[in-house]
Image (spheres, rainbow, N blue to C red):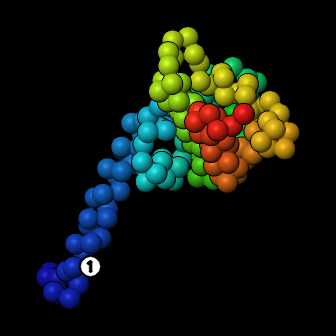
């Protein structure tokens, strides 16, 4: 059987797309959600692939353990169902892309804090995950007295929190 020249470019495009997709998925699965500095330092395109493939629920529970905060509290501010995360973790399944996006956002924020401390001085003994978990629940004047945790359930809210952290590092926030 021969392929007509009209359809050949389409066939090549389909083959390239199919061959490329597993490579992207394999790259994304090499990085752990708890490798905060690398999640923060990765490209937006890489994080999008990570989100689309879904974050393993087991890794979400690992991240929460590192934050040293009750999982119900973290899941509440990320708008995650505790029952769903626990069920998927027991089956070694991934979260939906929607839930994964908020979780990757949290990992990214922890990585941002870790990077800020490393750039600003001596990070020895500093635990970015624990610090962020505590700070998220403190009322912040720049947020009208609200806690940053109340912004963690949306990507826009997470961007706002990220910008606030960057402002703190620059010294512009008092």
Q: For mark 1, what is the residue?
A: 10
Answer left or right for 127 relative to 119.
Answer: right
Q: Is residue 106 visible?
A: no
Taking depth in this image into account, of 124 and 169 the one nearest to the observer is 169
Quarter where residue 12 is shown: bottom left
Q: Position of residue 95 (x, y in %)?
A: 61, 45
Taking depth in this image into account, of 115 and 36 the one nearest to the observer is 115
Count of numbered badges drawn on the protein: 1
Position of the C terminus by quadrant: top right
Answer left or right for 52 relative to 67.
Answer: left
Residue drawn at point x = 49 percent, y = 38 percent: 40
Answer left or right for 143 relative to 133.
Answer: right
Say if 98 sits above or below 42 in the image.
Answer: below
Q: Where is residue 115 in the image (x, y as percent from the top left)?
A: 49, 30
Residue drawn at point x = 31 percent, y = 64 percent: 17
Position of the N terminus by quadrant: bottom left
Q: Work out which residue is located at the far top of the displayed protein and give it.
A: 125
Say if 121 sits above or below 106 in the image.
Answer: above
Quarter where residue 147 is shown: top right
Say if 101 sits above or below 73 in the image.
Answer: below
At label 1, counting other C-alpha atoms closer than 10 Å, the crowd grade (few under 14, some 14-19, many 20 or more) is few
Residue drawn at point x = 60 percent, y = 49 percent: 101
Q: Is residue 23 visible?
A: yes
Q: Position of residue 27 (x, y in %)?
A: 36, 43
Helix or strand or loop: what does disc 1 sit on?
helix
Taking depth in this image into account, of 24 and 110 the one nearest to the observer is 110
Q: Position of residue 78 (x, y in %)?
A: 72, 42
């Amino acid at each position: 059987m021969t392929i007509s020249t009209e359809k050949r470019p389409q066939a090549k495009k389909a083959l390239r797309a199919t061959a490329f997709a597993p490579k992207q998925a394999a790259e994304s699965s090499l990085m752990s959600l708890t490798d905060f500095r690398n999640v923060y330092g990765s490209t937006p395109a890489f994080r999008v692939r990570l989100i689309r493939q879904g974050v393993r629920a087991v890794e979400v529970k690992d991240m929460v353990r590192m934050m040293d905060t009750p999982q119900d509290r973290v899941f509440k501010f990320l708008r995650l169902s505790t029952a769903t995360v626990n069920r998927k973790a027991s089956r070694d399944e991934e979260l939906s892309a929607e839930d994964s996006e908020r979780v990757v956002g949290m990992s990214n924020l922890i990585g941002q804090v870790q990077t800020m401390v490393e750039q600003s001085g001596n990070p020895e003994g500093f635990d970015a995950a624990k610090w962020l978990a505590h700070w998220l629940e403190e009322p912040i004047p720049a947020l009208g007295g609200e806690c940053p945790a109340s912004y963690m359930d949306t990507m826009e809210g997470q961007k706002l929190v990220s910008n606030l952290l960057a402002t703190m590092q620059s010294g512009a926030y008092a």
